[in-house]
Image (cartoon, grey):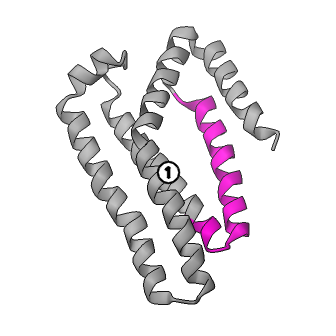
């Protein structure tokens, strides 16, 4: 549980020390922007999907379980694709008004998809009682995120 507070601190420290406070500010603004965009998809489909996956798993209703899982993955793909299209179309306006670096369109789109599906799969694993896979997923993602932040050229 201690990693929850240590990882952001270490990330901010390493980025600020290695690249400067301006780059750290750009990264944090960009991450905040991405988190705001993905909050609906991850909270709605993740929370509702988690609940129904667990319910249908418990009652051994495979047909409804598969349907919920398909909805939990399929609809976010459509929504995120629409969001990616809107971002691409209006990136000059969005990057200017939200103080985002103008060269980060593709990293933002990739991060939005990766973050959303990471959270959706994490909640699905938790909802279908694959706690060991859930824990391994968390450990790998924290370590890879930390390592990526240490070697990222941004």
Q: Residue furthest top?
A: 21
Between 41 and 142, the one lying in front of the other is 41
Dominant secondary structure, magenta: helix
Q: Residue at image x 47%, y 51%?
A: 42
- Image spot of residue 126 (x, y percent): 64, 66
Within the image, what quadrant is residue 59 found in?
Answer: bottom right
Compared with 141, 107 (above or below) is: above
Q: Is residue 142 magenta?
A: yes
Residue 129 in the figure: left or right of residue 79: right
Q: Residue furthest right?
A: 2
- Image spot of residue 128 (x, y percent): 61, 74
Compared with 118, 26 (above or below) is: above
Q: Residue at image x 54%, y 74%?
A: 53
Q: Residue at image x 60%, y 74%?
A: 54
* Quadrant where the image shows the N terminus: top right
Between 147 and 111, the one lying in front of the other is 111
Residue 142 in the figure: left or right of residue 99: right
Mark 1 lies on residue = 43
Within the image, what quadrant is residue 10 found in?
Answer: top right
Q: Which residues are magenta?
A: 124-152
Between 120 and 103, the one lying in front of the other is 120
Compared with 101, 49 (above or below) is: below
Between 62 and 108, the one lying in front of the other is 62
């Amino acid at each position: 549980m201690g990693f929850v507070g240590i990882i952001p601190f270490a990330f901010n420290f390493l980025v600020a020390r290695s690249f400067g406070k301006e780059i750290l500010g750009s990264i944090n603004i960009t991450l905040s922007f991405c988190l705001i965009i993905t909050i609906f998809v991850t909270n709605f489909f993740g929370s509702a999907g988690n609940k129904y996956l667990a319910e249908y798993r418990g009652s051994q209703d495979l047909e409804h379980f598969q349907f919920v899982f398909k909805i939990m993955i399929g609809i976010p793909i459509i929504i995120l694709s629409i969001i990616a299209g809107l971002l691409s179309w209006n990136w000059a306006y969005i990057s200017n008004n939200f103080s985002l670096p103008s060269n980060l369109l593709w990293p933002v789109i990739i991060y939005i998809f990766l973050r959303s599906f990471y959270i959706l799969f994490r909640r699905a694993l938790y909802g279908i009682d694959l706690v060991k896979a859930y824990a391994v997923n968390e450990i790998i993602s924290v370590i890879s995120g930390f390592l990526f932040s240490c070697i990222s050229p941004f």
